């Protein structure tokens, strides 16, 4: 939802300038990374916070799980933007060097690491 100038001045943390994905020029639909994991709080929960920001984009709640599992999940989520960027970088290269390169490009091909990477990218972008 676009912010008006008046509301943006009173709540500058709500203004989100879209970042464009370089190859496609399409807006990225998430806060760009890197993220950091902060916690645990008094309930054992962890927050996932974009660098240079103070507002959480996600929370990992303990729900009576062991603290080391909650912390591990938080660090995995905090690494998500970096992992997505790495997958975008290497997906095509992985296909080109696959012994199954003649069938590459199909998101349902489990034999090719590049196809598996593109399927994960589609999932992260909400397309799968």
Image (spheres, rainbow, N blue to C red):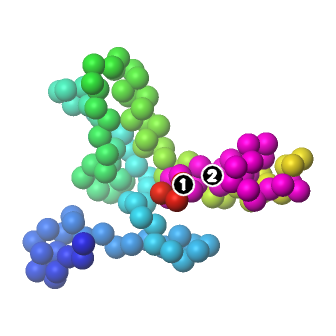
Marks 1 and 2 in Cβ contact (< 8 Å): yes
Q: Quadrant of residue 18?
A: bottom left
Magenta-colored stretch includes residue 120:
yes
x%, y% of residue 66? 35, 17
x%, y% of residue 14? 21, 66
Residue at 42% x, 64% y: name it.
Answer: 29
Residue at 40% x, 60% y: name it.
Answer: 30
x%, y% of residue 46? 29, 35
Residue 11 located left or right of residue 50: left
Residue beneath label 1, please?
A: 128
Mark 2 Cα shell of 10 Å, populated few (<14), some (14-19), many (≥20): many
Considering the image in quadrants, where does the N terminus appear? bottom left
x%, y% of residue 91? 70, 55
Magenta-colored stretch includes residue 114:
yes
Q: Is residue 11 visible?
A: yes
Secondary structure beneath label 1:
loop
* Disc number for residue 80: none
Which residues fall within the magenta stretch? Answer: 101-125
Q: Is 100 situated above or below 43?
A: below
Residue at 38% x, 60% y: name it.
Answer: 31
Whole-number angstrom distance, CA of label 1 to CA of label 2: 7 Å
Q: Is residue 85 visible?
A: no
Secondary structure beneath label 2:
helix
Residue beneath label 2, please?
A: 119
Magenta span main SS? helix
Q: Is 91 situated above or below 42?
A: below
Residue 85 located left or right of residue 109: left
């Amino acid at each position: 939802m676009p912010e008006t100038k008046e509301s943006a001045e009173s709540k500058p943390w709500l203004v989100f300038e879209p970042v464009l994905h370089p190859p496609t020029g399409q807006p990225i639909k998430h806060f760009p990374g890197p993220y950091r994991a902060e916690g645990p709080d008094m309930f054992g929960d962890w927050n996932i916070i974009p660098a240079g920001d103070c507002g959480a984009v996600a929370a990992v709640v303990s729900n009576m799980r062991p603290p080391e599992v909650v912390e591990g999940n938080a660090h995995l989520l905090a690494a998500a933007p970096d992992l997505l960027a790495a997958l975008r970088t290497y997906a095509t290269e992985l296909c080109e060097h696959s012994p199954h390169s003649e069938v590459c490009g199909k998101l349902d091909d489990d034999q090719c690491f590049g196809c598996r990477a593109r399927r994960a990218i589609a999932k992260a972008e909400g397309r799968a």
